[in-house]
Amino acid sequence: MSLIVAKFGGSSVANKERVFHAAEMMAAEHRKGHDVVVVVSAQGDTTDDFIEKINEINDKASNRERDVILSAGEQISMALFAMALEKLGCPVISLTGWQAGIKTDAVYSGARIKRVDTDRILCELDKKKIVVVAGFQGINNADDITTLGRGGSDTTAVAIAAALKADECRIYTDVDGVYTADPRIVKSARKLEEISYDEMLEMAALGAQVLHTRCIILAKKYNLNLEVLSSFTGAPGTKVKEVMTMEKMLVSGVTKDENTAMLTVMGLEDMPGAAYKLFSMLAAERINIDVIVQSALKGEVRDISFTVPLTSLEKTMEVLKKAQDTMGFGEVLVDDNIGKVSIVGAGMADNPGVATKMFEALYDAGINLKSISTSEIKVTVLIRREDTKKAVEAIHNRFFG
């Protein structure tokens, strides 16, 4: 028999009917003789509701106290899920992050898992119980509750599966797999039967919201059998794996990200270490930098443009103001009307002309490019935000139409 770790997202446990539907799926696996560990997210909009309550009291509250409240959503879900399994006649126990042995670093609201002590989970599995774990949370060395940030429940599930050497890790969500584009935008988008870890990682980093990057990195590190599938249909989903059995597709997907701003630092001194000093200050504040473009030399200075998440724009400007005082560069230009569109595919490495085909599709659609970034398996362009959806449709039609 197999050891299965299954994660259910917020929409999959949003109400009574969905909780029981998901519980029945796991009860069926348990009755087949499988060991089952379930990781759950907070129900529906619970986390957003908690954030609203926090802001009503103190919108400058410390991240430590925020984590205490935000972790409660998953604890509610785990208890309700366990109660449903009890009603279905299954032996079950629910565990918080700390009870499940999830140890993290000390970064509140964005903690990273350092290890998973599996003794308690294994003890309960030996008693033939289904173990239901609260996702998104852990405990640090000070015994404080920490939360893992966006996509934290996915990461919890993969970390537990890796620590237990599980046979399968299933990510149940409200979509039935990974598509070549967002099917809400592109009606002709196709579901992929499988996708490589590297392709999935790029797609997640570039705006696809099916899986979070941290869980994919973990799955790749431990060569985990990972599958994304629907909690509503039970149909086979998309397998994320190291080696694909089918021939590499030229392009596996088209992604978009509208949560992007571009900043240009003018007049950065042309000397060794200037870029390092600038970006190290941003890294210290945990600001993610994506597309970076450096201009040609202008006398003794250069301009550097880069993108950050729109949600990090205010913090980025604060850091750059401090850097400006110490490094002496010129003004900082901000363009917050940015959309990022990318194509991803392992087959691109062996097929020249893929970028040209993408650019042709954008030209035919009348879309102007602000910046271009490439790697072995991706091409990313920055465009006006209002053109993003049209660009995705045009590119998808060119490669898949």
Image (tube, helix red, strand yellow):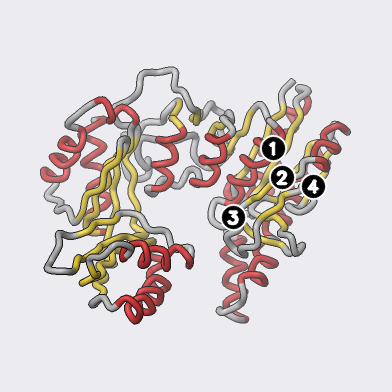
SS of the residue under disc 3: loop
For the C terminus, which image quadrant? top left
For the N terminus, which image quadrant? top right
Whichever of labels 1 and 4 marks the residue nearer the N terminus, that label is: 4
Q: Which residue is mark 3?
A: 44
Residue type at mark 3: give it.
Gly
Residue 365: percent from left, percent from top:
14, 46
- Circle number at residue 340: none
Residue extending furthest toward the right: 127
Report, in whole angstroms, how far the alpha carbon at label 4 lies from the one at label 3.
19 Å
SS of the residue under disc 4: strand
Report, in whole angstroms, how far the alpha carbon at label 1 lies from the one at label 4.
18 Å
Front tag of 2 and 3: 2
Q: Is there any visible trace of residue 90 in the rendered image?
A: no
Q: Which residue is mark 2?
A: 116
Q: How many marks?
A: 4
SS of the residue under disc 1: helix
Residue 366: percent from left, percent from top:
12, 50
Residue 4: percent from left, percent from top:
69, 30
- Circle number at residue 94: 4
> How packed is label 2: few (under 14 Cα within 10 Å), some, or many (20 or more)?
many
Report, in whole angstroms, how far the alpha carbon at label 1 lies from the one at label 2.
6 Å
> How packed is label 4: few (under 14 Cα within 10 Å), some, or many (20 or more)?
many
